[in-house]
Image (cartoon, grey):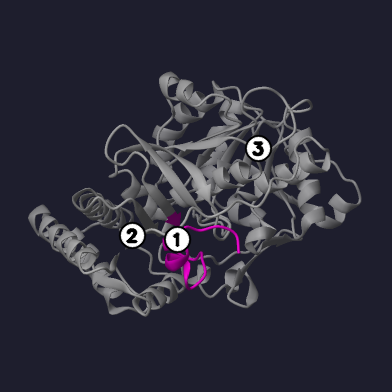
């Protein structure tokens, strides 16, 4: 439990808007497991919804912005940012992926910063992508990410350099986001400067420009400093961009100041007698998890993603086929795992891309159709079997699939690895109380699906 918030302001400390569902949920887990009440909503919450959950210190909204165009952002973000600003949080956080997934045309962080700067008028925009707890590190401006037993610079990362939509070919965070906006003056405040006591710079090169300051973070000390810099500058800089590393850093600073206490390690919620998994990820990490699941009692069900590029009747037939396979697996005591591919080299990936090209669909549109289809498979299978625990694998897939479930919010129940916890769904229909995990494609241990089946918890 936290100490009384004598030194912290009343009301929400952070409101955040996540550019994908798994990342948005990760912010909630950081705050919740630090002892701060937080909820993630699928749309900006209504007054009636907020009245049901008083005393929230963190209020988030999940989206699929990471997979969207700058034009989509122009249409969607100003109104949502304004609604979150009306909640009067101490900080407004545009949450991006800890591996910086974005480009000038897809999930543009630069365009989101332009929109946020216009509304919040910050002197500068702090940018903190690193999260050492997740093996994401920024050193002298360059982003590094762990994979298996090693740490790679982002542009040499075995997974992120091969991302199917936004392959990473630049590890310098300031350079990467500057390529996404011609209004940004982006530079790094290095750990050398931070450790020497440097303040956060607050001035663009000229009027009309936006100063963006990326912050190094490689360990507890630099993370605490980053949290202090962001918090102390919140009045001049109420808009911050970054991963859940922002909340990790803030929590470290608040604890360092004695404003919140260390929370006890959260426990698991117990083993479920049955569970359903759907996966739209083609990551090698997910491939390893699928292989583990197949060897440990899960029923592998391949979803033919090319049907998402075909006329609607063909897609619905494939949805019903997969639902029937899920129900049959559950009836014989197996946990179904519906997946589009088993890694980036699965021939199914090439077939899907060719089908999207043949149907004149962008990859974003084609992936949305797949995610929505997986969501329908999951919902129908859950309702028809009365199963109460599920996993959605894939960051973009989670956004599209979760919206098919009819839920309006999530709260954290039990942790696994940082960024992939087990949540409780809040809904006005049959999905209320569903135990749901959302996992980014490159996240989790090989036995992740089994860990969720066992109820999560630290280990």
Which quadrant would residue 132 be assigned to in this image?
Answer: bottom right
Q: Position of residue 418 (x, y in %)?
A: 58, 57
Q: Which mark is drawn over residue 452?
A: 1
Q: Is residue 94 left or right of residue 360?
A: right
Does the image show residue 190? no
Q: Which mark is drawn over residue 210?
A: 3
Q: Secondary structure at mark 2?
A: loop
Q: CA distance from mark 3 to mark 2?
A: 47 Å
* Residue 448 highlighted magenta (yes or no): yes
Q: Position of residue 107 (x, y in %)?
A: 46, 49
Q: Position of residue 384 (x, y in %)?
A: 18, 51
Q: Secondary structure at mark 3?
A: strand
Q: Which mark is drawn over residue 275?
A: 2
Q: Which residues are magenta?
A: 438-459
Q: Which mark is drawn over residue 65?
A: none
- The crowd level at tag 3 (other Cα within 10 Å; few <14, some 14-19, many 20+) is many
142 to 200, vertically: above or below: below
Earlier sequence position, callout 3 versus callout 1: 3
Q: Nearer the viewer, mark 3 or mark 1?
A: 1
Which quadrant would residue 87 be assigned to in this image?
Answer: top right
Which quadrant would residue 358 be assigned to in this image?
Answer: bottom left
Q: Are marks 2 and 1 in contact (CB under 8 Å)?
A: yes
Earlier sequence position, callout 2 versus callout 1: 2
Q: Nearer the viewer, mark 3 or mark 2?
A: 2
Earlier sequence position, callout 3 versus callout 2: 3
Q: Residue at x 28, y 53 (%)?
A: 387
For the stretch drawn in magenta, what is the main secondary structure? loop
Location of the N terminus (image quadrant): top right
* Residue 374 highlighted magenta (yes or no): no
């Amino acid at each position: 439990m936290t100490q009384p918030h004598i030194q912290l302001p009343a009301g929400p400390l952070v409101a955040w808007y996540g550019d994908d569902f798994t990342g948005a949920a990760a912010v909630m887990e950081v705050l919740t497991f630090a002892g701060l009440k937080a909820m993630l909503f699928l749309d900006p919450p209504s007054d009636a919804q907020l009245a049901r959950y008083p005393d929230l210190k963190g209020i988030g909204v999940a989206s699929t912005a990471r997979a969207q165009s700058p034009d989509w952002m122009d249409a969607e973000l100003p109104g949502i940012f304004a609604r979150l600003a009306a909640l009067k949080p101490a900080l407004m956080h545009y949450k991006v992926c800890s591996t910086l997934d974005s480009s000038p045309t897809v999930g543009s962080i630069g365009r989101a910063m332009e929109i946020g700067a216009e509304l919040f008028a910050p002197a500068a925009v702090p940018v903190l992508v690193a999260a050492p707890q997740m093996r994401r590190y920024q050193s002298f401006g360059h982003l590094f990410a762990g994979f298996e037993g090693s740490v790679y610079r982002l542009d040499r990362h075995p997974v992120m350099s091969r991302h199917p939509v936004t392959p990473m070919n630049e590890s310098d965070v300031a350079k990467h986001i500057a390529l996404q906006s011609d209004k940004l003056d982006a530079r790094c405040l290095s750990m050398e400067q931070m450790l020497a006591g440097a303040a956060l710079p607050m001035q663009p090169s000229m009027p009309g420009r936006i100063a963006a300051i990326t912050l190094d973070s490689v360990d507890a000390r630099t993370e605490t400093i980053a949290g202090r810099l962001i918090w102390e500058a919140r009045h001049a800089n109420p808009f911050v961009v970054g991963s859940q590393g922002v909340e990790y850093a803030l929590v470290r600073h608040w604890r360092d100041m004695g404003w919140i206490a260390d929370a006890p390690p959260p426990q698991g919620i117990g083993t479920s007698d049955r569970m359903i998994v759907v996966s739209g990820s083609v990551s090698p990490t997910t491939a390893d998890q699928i292989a583990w699941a197949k060897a440990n009692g899960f029923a592998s069900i391949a979803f033919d993603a090319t049907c998402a590029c075909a006329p609607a009747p063909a897609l619905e037939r494939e949805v019903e086929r997969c639902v029937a396979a899920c129900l049959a697996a559950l009836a014989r005591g197996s946990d179904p795992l519906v997946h589009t591919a088993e890694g980036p080299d699965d021939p199914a990936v090439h077939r899907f891309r060719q089908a999207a090209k043949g149907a004149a669909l962008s990859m974003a549109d084609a992936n949305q159709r797949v995610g929505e289809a997986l969501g329908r498979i999951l919902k129908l299978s859950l309702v028809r079997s009365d199963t109460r625990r599920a996993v959605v694998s894939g960051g973009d897939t989670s956004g599209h699939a979760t919206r098919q479930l009819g839920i309006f919010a999530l709260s954290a129940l039990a942790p696994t690895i940082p960024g992939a916890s087990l949540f409780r769904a809040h809904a006005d229909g049959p999905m209320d109380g569903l135990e749901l995990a959302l996992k980014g494609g490159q996240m989790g241990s090989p036995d992740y699906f089994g860990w969720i089946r066992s109820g999560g918890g630290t280990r």
